[in-house]
């Protein structure tokens, strides 16, 4: 079983623009398929069986360019994702994200790490389009 998945994408916007957008948890529904809504430390995730409410903690460090997400489910299981925005030059950056294997409950909700990785590739393209058309 694979222990992680690393994905990244080049964004043609400044690191600051990308970081501000990515670190804003309430913007997750704009570029991810998994989140239906996010408000004040809570989120609603879309699943094949309907929507599930979770606790969502976001740790963001502008100085380091890191944005990490911790999702806690009703049964106490926790899923995490770790990311970083790295400047290439004034108007370009790279956004990289590390997915770790989901807890059993999340695997049942979202699927395996491999299927999450495939979904993430689409979400990164959506993020790029959103940032570059509005950034």
Image (cartoon, grey):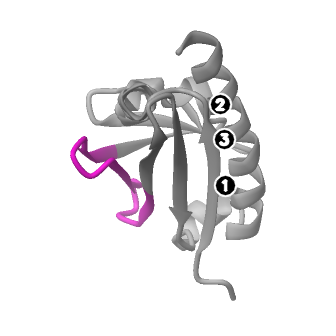
For disc 3, the marked residue is 124
**Quarter of the view holding residue 78:** bottom left
Between the C-alphas of marks 1 and 2, the distance is 22 Å
134 sits left or right of 114 in the view: left
Q: Secondary structure at mark 1?
A: helix
- Residue at (42, 53) in percent of width and height: 84
**Pointer 3 and pointer 1: residues touching (CB < 8 Å)?**
no
Q: Position of residue 25 (x, y in %)?
A: 38, 32
Question: Can the viewer see residue 50 in this picture?
Answer: no
For disc 1, the marked residue is 110
| Outermost residue to the front | 89
Q: Secondary structure at mark 2?
A: helix
Give the labeled residue for mark 2. Answer: 128
Residue pictured at 65% horizontal, 31% vertical: 128
Circle 3 or circle 1, nearest the eye:
3
Please tell me which residue is depicted at 36% across the width and 28% down the height of the picture.
20
Does residue 83 lie above or below 44 as drawn?
A: below
**Pointers 3 and 2 in contact (CB under 8 A)?**
yes
37 and 131: which one is in front? 131
Helix, strand or loop at mark 3? helix
Which quadrant holds residue 104?
bottom right
Residue 68 on the magenta span: yes
Q: Is residue 87 above or below residue 5?
A: above
* Circle nearer the N terminus (1, 2): 1
**Frontmost residue, 27 versus 41:** 27
- Residue at the (76%, 41%) spot, across then down: 122
Image position, residue 30 (x, y; %): 58, 23
User: Which residues, given as a range, are shown in magenta?
Assistant: 56-82
Give the x, y percent position of residue 59: 26, 48
Magenta residue check for 26: no
């Amino acid at each position: 079983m694979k222990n992680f998945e690393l994905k990244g994408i080049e964004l043609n916007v400044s690191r600051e623009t990308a970081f501000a957008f990515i670190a804003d948890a309430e913007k997750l529904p704009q570029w991810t398929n998994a989140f239906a809504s996010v408000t004040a430390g809570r989120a609603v995730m879309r699943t094949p069986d309907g929507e599930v409410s979770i606790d969502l903690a976001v740790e963001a460090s502008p100085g380091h360019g890191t944005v990490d997400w911790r999702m806690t489910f009703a049964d106490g299981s926790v899923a995490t994702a770790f990311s970083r925005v790295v400047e290439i030059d004034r108007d370009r950056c790279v956004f990289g994200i590390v997915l770790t294997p989901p807890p059993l409950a999340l695997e049942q909700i979202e699927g395996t790490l491999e299927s999450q990785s495939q979904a993430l590739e689409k979400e990164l393209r959506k993020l790029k389009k959103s940032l570059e058309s509005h950034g």
